[in-house]
Image: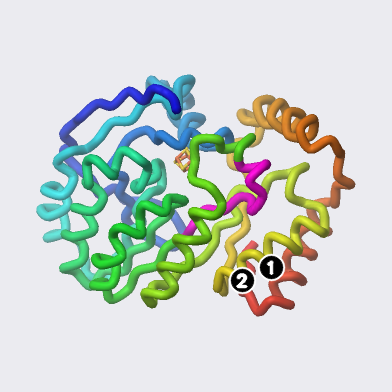
Amino acid sequence: MRYLQVQEIRCKHLLHRTNASFAEWTLNPYIGCGFGCSYCYVPVLRAKRGQEGADTWGNWVQVKVNAPDVIRREMLDVPRDAHILIGSATDAWQPIEKRYCVSRGVLYELSFYPNKVTILTRSPLLIRDIDLLKRFEQVSVHISVPTVDEKVRRVFEPYAPSVAGRIRLTHRLLEAGIRATWAWCPFLPGVENTSEQIRRYVQTAAQAGVREIWVGRINYWSFLEERYRALLRKYRAQAGWIPHLLLREETEQLVREECEKSGIVCRI
Ligand code: SF4
């Protein structure tokens, strides 16, 4: 348990144009993120832009309390074929959402429109909102699962939901008929890249019912490398062994092969 500084704010705009390859608009009902993952690229961007809070990332969050009202107004001007991404710079279902329900309010407003919506999250709290997700014509959830090893998770993202929670979320979404994919994002270099670990990851995904995995690397490596290496040393000291590391090409090839064996579409 740790102290989280919460501030309520009112936003003028919620939707922002994005250059992401698969969406035209993005929205984030919160600024900041209580999960505070060690490799998160958002504080790096904040530091580059000279914004406050980069060095305390994970310890504070601002709640856009009027987000549902703003999206209700903004959606009047959004083309019906525009794709909307939720959660590009925060996890919209982080723990504070249980109390404020602003992401649920935003989903409710969006559910009146035919727009395609993609959600990025690692939080089983989204299970609460499956009733709303079922109302959408086109919705998909990318569940961030950088590891299926709880020991690794506790080192690199100690305040984020357990692996079991993410698997539970996957099951519940798929049971409800909602498209759910896994984002192996980021792929943790030096940790999850032995052939045994890759096999275990893909088999765990297959057992959870996943049929598509997106693999991505750590963004802004040059900014995050030092911190990452310190955590890697910590993990290795705890694990008590140093895995034989595969080269990147070998790793990617192995991921592709394991996915193919399990009937999973792999996007690297
Ligand atoms: S959940 Fe996403 S936004 Fe939140 S700290 Fe982790 S990587 Fe960053």
User: In the drawing, does residue 153 fall left or right of residue 232?
Assistant: left
Residue at the image point whose x is 76% and y is 33% from the top: 238
Residue at the image point whose x is 35% and y is 48% from the top: 93
- Give whichever of 101, 254 is nearer the camera: 101
User: In the drawing, does residue 24 fall left or right of residue 168?
Assistant: left
Ligand 1 within 8 Å of the CB at mark 2: no
* Residue 78 magenta-highlighted: no
The local crowd at label 1, few if under 14, some if 14 to 19, many if 20 or more residues have their Cα within 10 Å, is some
Ligand 1 within 8 Å of the CB at mark 1: no
> What residue is shown with label 1?
203
Residue 99 x %, y %: 24, 40
> What residue is shown with label 2?
207
Residue 213 x %, y %: 59, 65
> Residue flagged by tag 2: what amino acid is it?
Gln
* Residue 149 magenta-highlighted: yes
Which quarter of the picture shows residue 207?
A: bottom right
Residue at the image point whose x is 33% and y is 52% from the top: 26
> Residue flagged by tag 1: what amino acid is it?
Gln
Whole-number angstrom distance, CA of label 2 to CA of label 1: 6 Å
Q: Quadrant of the C terminus?
A: bottom right
Q: Secondary structure at mark 1?
A: helix
Q: Which residues are magenta?
A: 142-153
- Give whichever of 132, 223 is nearer the camera: 132
In the picture shown, does residue 157 fall above or below 69? Answer: above
In the picture shown, does residue 199 fall above or below 124? Answer: below
Q: Are marks 2 and 1 in contact (CB under 8 Å)?
A: yes
Residue 236's disc is none
Which quarter of the picture shows residue 96?
A: top left
Q: Quadrant of the N terminus?
A: top left
Q: Secondary structure at mark 2?
A: helix
